Image: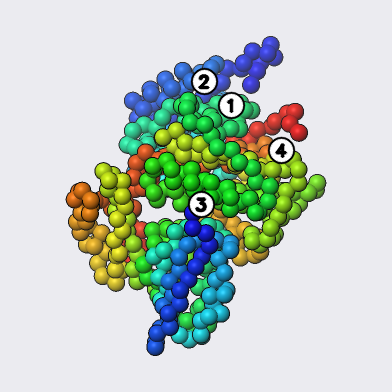
Amino acid sequence: MKAGLRWNVVRGPERIDISLSGAVDEFASLDILLEELPHNVPVRIDLTHVDRINSVGVRNWIVFVDKLRLHHIEVELDGCSVVIVRQMNMILQFRGHGVVRSAYAPYYCSRCKKEQLRLIDLTVDVATQLHAPLPCPTCGTVLDLDEEEQLYTELQA
Amino acid sequence: MTTEEGKPARTRLLLIDPDETHLRWLARVIQSGISEVEVCSRTSIAKDPDPYDLVVMSCDLLDTELSAKQIMGVRRDHPDVPFLLISSSKHIYPRLITGFRDKGLMNILARKVRREWAPPSDLVVTLQKLLRPDIFGLDKYFPRWGMDPISMTVRSTADKSDVLARAHDYAADLDIHPRLVPQFLTVVDESISNALYNGPCDEQGVPRFAHLPRQTTVSLQAGEEIAVTLRCDGVRLGVSVVDPFGSLTRDTIFDHLSKCFRRGRDQIDFDPGGAGIGLYVCFESLSHFVINISARRRTEVIGLIDVRGTYLDYVSEGKSFNVFESQEAGLP
């Protein structure tokens, strides 16, 4: 089991790219990450590799995003993992002032017992992307979406 | 329940289901699974003033609002009687507890599981636990003989990460859908944190650790250890977390769940201590969530995940949720 939350920060000319990975829990030191970020510079946070979040982690995340707002930092959320998509559905304040740009949808091959992820661009039609055929790379079976479709359509709202 | 002569008292059970075929099946399950029971079956929800010991209502109307009104009509006719709702709608329970604030609505069973009628064993176990004082134990939900459970003990905050690592390895080795593993870990995590921080109280009943940030290490005294048990039978993956405090109350459960289901600005607690969404997270992460309470003696949180299908099967199914209370005698 991977422990803790890790991050990588890449500073661009107009934006800072942050990628998070691991678990967001009571030990996630998001305040330390916050100290690395200058005020007024937009950030894009990649959540592809966030694989678990607990209740105190949810609160830490909300507080972190709210501090970004107070520092006048615009937030884009990219590659939201399936775990994050669920939280956005459950917790009203989870995305804060962040704009969700893309999220991963899971597809599952019951034959090979393997999951495939598809990155859904939330700036264009979601349903078309979700329903586009996705073959299993191992057996070729066309995979079914393995999550509730409405979670993704609601992200766009 | 016993009579003055010491014989088991006959239980009068009102059973309502508009689907006559399902009603007959439920009645058969109850008659064969519960001793000394008189089942009064009805397909209609017409007012029935007779006294009952237990009311079981099964319905699956597509219209959540109409369903909720019918259920609450039956509840109002029998306000002081244990009530079990059987419904496949995963929207009905949040609607009921946010809309009607009835703390007697703490028992719901999924009507269908994997597009078939739910297993009779769950109904029998739930009714037995509503009728008897013996409510504790994960084994009641695992009738199949075979796999031995894994048992662990938590004495301090430091033990939690070890238990989570072991729970991860246990679940990951089961060849279940990979996405169910983090769901299971979340429930183990939340249940242990709740027992460790919110369970312990002083002699006046004041919580000892509830106000502390969850990264603060706390240690339990001898005799206060939390017991964690993991179990799987190929159908369900389960965890039981038992603390010897019994401080979780029906009111706390109700208040936390209804606050979270409303999804308002007060959903998260921002004071030091827990975030106030642990029970909600468990509810949302489980196929079947059970809380057993013996006030000031012990609390058991049981989480069950149906591991047979895809992740979509698991998230689309109706949920079961039960709160049982017992007055235990002779426990330390």
Q: Is residue A121 left or right of residue B330?
A: left
Counting from the top left corner in percent of width and height, residue B222 is at 76, 43
First in sequence: mark 4 or mark 2?
2
Q: Does the rendering let one see residue B266?
A: no
* Above or below, A99 relative to B31: below
Residue, disc 3: B186
Mark pair 3, 4: CA separation: 26 Å
Q: Nearer the viewer, mark 4 or mark 2?
A: 4
Residue, disc 2: B34
Q: Is residue B297 left or right of residue A19?
A: right
Q: Nearer the viewer, mark 3 or mark 4?
A: 3
Identify the residue at image location x=62%, y=16%.
Answer: B8
Do labels 2 and 1 touch, CB within 8 Å? yes
Counting from the top left corner in percent of width and height, residue B310 is at 34, 45
First in sequence: mark 2 or mark 3?
2
Kind of residue sitting beneath label 3: Thr
- Discs 2 and 3 carry the same chain letter: yes
Kind of residue sitting beneath label 4: Arg
Kind of residue sitting beneath label 2: Ile
Mark pair 4, 2: CA separation: 27 Å
Q: Based on the displayed image, in which of its 4 quarters is residue B136 positioned?
A: top right
- Circle 2: is it few (<14), some (14-19), or many (20+) Cα within 10 Å? some
- Discs 3 and 4 carry the same chain letter: yes
Q: Which mark is residue A151?
A: none
Mark pair 1, 4: CA separation: 20 Å
Identify the residue at image location x=48%, y=20%.
Answer: B33
Q: Does the rendering let one see residue B180?
A: yes
Mark pair 2, 1: CA separation: 9 Å
First in sequence: mark 1 or mark 3?
1
